[in-house]
Amino acid sequence: MPHTIRMVRDPLGQSVATICLLPVTQDTFDILSVFVPDIMARLAAHPHLDVDLSRPDDTRLVTMVGVRTRHTVFSVPLLTGTVLRYTLESSSGRRTLGMVLDPRFKLLLEKLGWTAYPFPLISESDLLLYSLDLRFEHIPRWAARMTRVTLVDPLTALKSVTVANMRGLLSAYHDTGRFQRLAEAMGLTLPPEQLRGLLLQALQAFAKKPHGTAAAALIRQSYLDPAPATRLALADQWNVSRATFHRHLSRAVAEFAHFIHEQV
């Protein structure tokens, strides 16, 4: 079924994700049951779903897998647009099912009107089965809901900033043009001053964590102070070698990015 697989590319043409759309028919059900029997058995027996295998256009199963490379800038608008495009393209007149673990996609699908159902395959799993019913009689209700939804908000996008992107934002903190370009590529729609304020507030909250005080001080002195000292001067100030200082700073930025992801 290679014709069902499509590649999602960023504006530079690099692959960022693959998306697969399968009609849920008896044939595809039998094929998938060979490879993922537990999933398909649970899908068939799910109490909230009524999958009619005799109707090829009734239900589709969608999967989206991210392709992570160090060259790829995670773009919230790109992935939002991709999910929205395939939602409209594949779901009109039918129901679509998808299983999701990533919290970024869970929030996005909920905003797009998908309904979440527990779908535990293993103990304490966060896996959810999402269903979007756009069979014709359901379309007016979905359309009315979409007119009241903001698909990408600053806090949702900020939660998706990777460690590498956070390092780029902090490095460009005092360069408004570069800072804004990076922010826009990540889907951060706030004006630069407001976004700087948001980062500063997050850093202040991070500094109050048990192990965040030193890490927050490293970030503030290296990136946010009005006239940040050189790395060599800061290494001397912290009484460590330059290589050790770089390791501590990299770890601090990673911990800060993870803190934001957990808090927002």
Image (cartoon, helix red, strand yellow):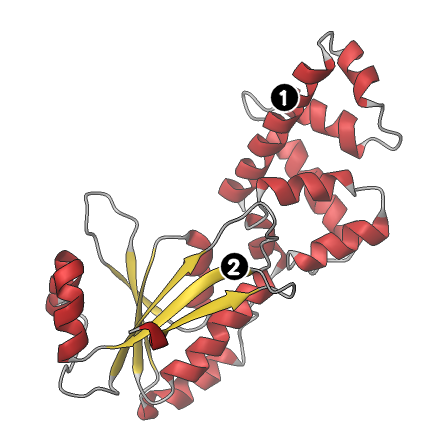
Instruction: Look at the picture and state if 66 lies above or below 95.
Output: above
Q: Which residue is at 28% across, 74% downward?
A: 1
Q: Of label 2 and label 1, which has the lower sequence position?
A: 2
Question: Eyeballing the image, is 43 above or below 166?
Answer: below
Residue 218 - label: none
Q: Quadrant of residue 62?
A: bottom left
Query: Mark 2 to mark 1: distance in Å?
Result: 29 Å
**Disc sitting over residue 247 in the figure:** 1
Residue 152, can we see it?
no
Residue 24: x %, y % from top left: 22, 77
Dot 1 amino acid type: Arg
Q: Nearer the viewer, residue 214 or 31?
A: 31
Q: Residue at x 78, y 55 (%)?
A: 180
SS at mark 1? helix
Residue topped by disc 2:
16
Q: How busy is the neighbourhood of tag 1: few (under 14 within 10 Å), some, or many (20 plus)? A: few
Reply above or below: 197 against 34. above
39, 217: nearer the viewer: 39
